[in-house]
Amino acid sequence: MNGTDDGRHEDAAPRTESGSIGRRSPRTGTEPVTARSPLRLRLLLSGIFAPVFVAATAYFAVWAADSGPGESPGRGPLTVLAVVCGVVALLALIDLVVVARRLRRERAVAPPTR
């Protein structure tokens, strides 16, 4: 601005290269500059719940296939439960891949020296 370097601003990596596809919204000034997603926690939670929901999908699908007419719960609700569990399992697996990629990328980049 006035040509003096008071050390408050540092050159950062372009925001378009980090995170989601496309450009991110500009900072509003209310969030910390160094805010980061808790990747290790996301990795742990996705690692735990992906197999749980895969197993639940298989369980509800088999139960729906074995249910006969007039049984409660019927084939319809069990199929809906199997589909919902399958979608959640797919989201958890996608999150596992994304988080693992981001952690690998963080490890590959050396921290900036001051």
Image: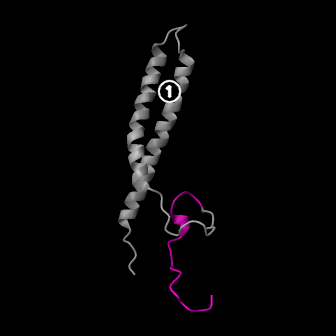
Query: Which residue is drawn at the image coordinates 42% and 44% (left, top)?
Result: 46
Colouring style: one colour
Residue 32 shown in magenta: no
Query: Which residue is drawn at the image coordinates 44% and 56% (left, top)?
Result: 38
Is residue 93 or residue 5 the one in the foreground? 5
Query: Which residue is drawn at the image coordinates 59% and 92% (left, top)?
Result: 3
Q: Amino acid at mark 1?
A: Ala
Say above or below: 47 vs 83.
below
- What residue sits right under mark 1 in the picture? 82
Circle 1 sits in a helix, a strand or a loop, which is it?
helix
**Residue 60: x %, y % from top left:** 46, 23
Specify the quadrant that holds the N terminus: bottom right
Instruction: Provide the residue span drawn in magenta.
Output: 1-22
Say above or below: 13 vs 25.
below
Say above or below: 68 vs 61.
above
Q: Is residue 44 left or right of residue 13?
A: left
**Residue 32: x %, y % from top left:** 53, 67
List the single residue furthest toward the top. 70
